Image: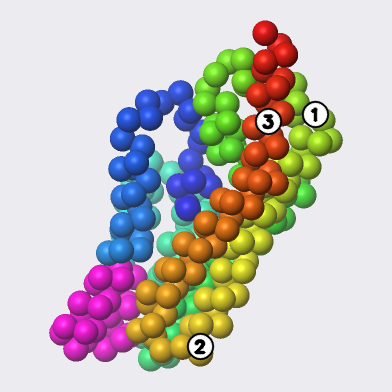
Amino acid sequence: MTQTLTAPARAEQPRRGNLGTMLTPLALDVAAPMACYYLLHGAFGTSEVAALAVSGVIPAVRVVAGIVRDRTLNGLAGLTLAVNVAGIALSFVTGDARMMIAKDSALSGVISLFMMLSAFTARPVMTPGMRAFITRGNAVREAAWERLAGSARFRRAERRFTGIWGGALLADCAARLIGAFTLPVSTMVWLSNVLLIAALVVGLLVAGAFGSGPIMTMVGIEARDAR
């Protein structure tokens, strides 16, 4: 998610290898920490706090590696790193493993609020990624986007796209926060990821239907009429 929100659009780059690029962060941020927790806690009898703390180091290391590789610290990457470190620290200070689960929902909450606030500005945060997907670097479609960018209908669709994504992540935040303090930690380790994936699927479907879908249609018609 961090890469999606913060990386500049590069529609002109080859699509080859994109699947691996998308799946690697997912494996490091979701699969690896979950496997690490169940291995340490289930197989070796490590405490829940220690197992969650160690598993939380994996996504933190990925963020640090990205910062070193890109030689820049963007706000969202810094927030992700800070939340991971804070969650690990709070878990050891309080001795409550639930704090490690709750920190994930806190991150979703902050990102969702950032999205929804940006939806009311001139530059909704999800627009660059959507633009790269729709225009794919095609000069005619890029020109069509520029001509449409000033229309009220087009701007509303842009805002809806980002606002819907913000709402989906806010719902994910609420669900995971409730689960963190009401369900067993071992259940929330996997359920937390299921809730996040469900939120992403809902976001894709609803934002596509009411945001990117209408924009794609408008750009297609505008590009066709310009030929």
Q: Report the quarter where the C terminus lies.
A: top right
Please provide percent x and percent y for residue 6.
51, 45
As drawn, the residue found furthest toward the right would be: 152
Q: Is residue 66 magenta?
A: no
Q: Decide: is 196 above or below 125.
A: below
Residue shown at the point (30%, 63%) measured from the top left: 31
As drawn, the residue found furthest toward the left would be: 44
Q: Is residue 172 left or right of residue 154?
A: left
- Looking at the rendered structure, the kind of residue marked 3 is Thr
Structural distance between the alpha carbons of marks 1 and 3: 16 Å
Label 2: element kind: helix
Res 36 visible: yes
Label 3, on which residue?
A: 217
Label 2, on which residue?
A: 181
Structural distance between the alpha carbons of marks 1 and 2: 46 Å
Residue shown at the point (59%, 55%) measured from the top left: 203
Structural distance between the alpha carbons of marks 2 and 3: 44 Å
Q: Is residue 29 left or right of residue 105?
A: left
- Looking at the rendered structure, the kind of residue marked 2 is Phe
Label 1: element kind: loop
Magenta part of the chain: 33-56
2 or 3: tag closer to the N-terminus: 2
The quarter of the displayed image where residue 43 is located: bottom left
Residue shown at the point (37%, 74%) measured from the top left: 190
Q: Is residue 64 left or right of residue 216?
A: left
Label 1, on which residue?
A: 150
Local crowd at mark 2 within 10 Å, few (<14), some, or many (≥20)? Answer: some
